[in-house]
Amino acid sequence: MVTTTSRRTRGARRAFAGALLAGLTLFTSAGAAVADDPSASASPGDEGAGPTEAGTTFRTATALQQGQTGTAQASAGDYLYWVFPADTGRRPTVKATVKFPEGEAKRSASTWQIDVYDGLRRRQACQYGHQTRKAGADASAVELSCVLRTVRSWSEPWANDPLPGSYYVRLTVVNLPADDLGLPFEAEVRADSVDKGGAHHVDGALAEPLVPGISVTGTSGTSQARAAAEPEDGWASGWWTTRWLWTVGGGVLAALAAVFGYSLTRGRGRPAHVPHGV
């Protein structure tokens, strides 16, 4: 004969198992929805060719979307600038290639470098990569790379953490004999990023992304207003992050576990022969 306590315990176990399966289904469906969201792709920008020129200062930096390849023709000694957007939870990677034309006179060895600055023009350190590289006299090209830290949603005022907004890329030669200054070269720059998710989120958020204001530059004697680059799907900075999903889901599972534990302890603490209502 099955006692009332046994029936109650089995019923509580079935209810807990059903709630646990429902919770796992919720997490799985939510993760799939995030993965299918076009805005969560590794390269939000359109794939393919990008701008064919570069700026020479921060104010004239050429806008570059992630996933695009920007090119420029320049002379050794010039400073080339591009600007691209990076949002919360993403880890940007910048790659640059310097190509030397064939058939030119013999060159000396040179050292090239890329630097990345945030919207406040603070130089951001590279986690890893080849930020500075030396090109031999007979080299046809040199490749550079810089993997930044994951962009945070909020930071202390004294910290130098990467925050959502515009990021400037500067490419130049840092060591070259004076006789070789002015030699032509071709530059290619590309910015990509991967979504690192809620593991890197922190509490708090910026009121606005760190982007420069609209600047006015002269082109052929005319003034043109240029807005700062931003993601095609808009900025994701705000109160909502994937961290909320894990926090709420964990709270729900903890509450279900507490109810299940209470049901077990209540059932075991009551003698099986004692009738209900006594």
Image (cartoon, helix red, strand yellow):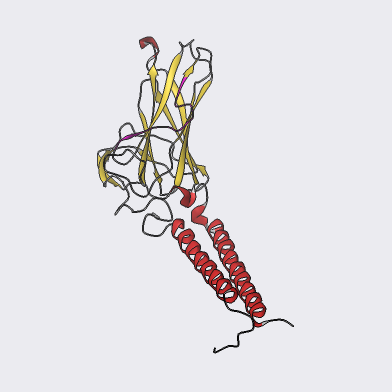
Percent position of residue 221, x then y: 25, 38
Q: Is residue 95 left or right of residue 225?
A: right
Question: Can residue 223 be seen from the camera position used here?
Answer: no
Residue drawn at (37%, 54%) of the image: 237
Residue 208 or residue 269, whichever sits in front: 269
- Report the predominant secondary structure element of the magenta stretch: loop
Q: Quadrant of residue 61?
A: top left
Q: Is residue 177 magenta?
A: no
Residue drawn at (31%, 52%) of the image: 206
Q: Quadrant of residue 60?
A: top left
Please tell me how many numbered marks the rendered image carries: 0
Q: Is residue 158 left or right of residue 101?
A: left
Residue 111 or residue 18, whichever sits in front: 18
Range of residues picked out in magenta: 121-133
Residue drawn at (43%, 42%) of the image: 150
Q: Is residue 131 magenta?
A: yes
Q: Quadrant of the C terminus?
A: bottom right
Question: Can residue 222 be seen from the camera position used here?
Answer: yes
Percent position of residue 260, x then y: 56, 71
Q: Which residue is situated farthest in the bottom direction here?
A: 277
Residue drawn at (40%, 60%) of the image: 240
Percent position of residue 99, x then y: 50, 24
Query: Does residue 49 sit above or below 34 in this rendering?
Result: above
Residue 203 or residue 226, whichever sits in front: 203
Q: Quadrant of the N terminus?
A: bottom right
Query: Does residue 254 sit above or below 11 in this rendering?
Result: above
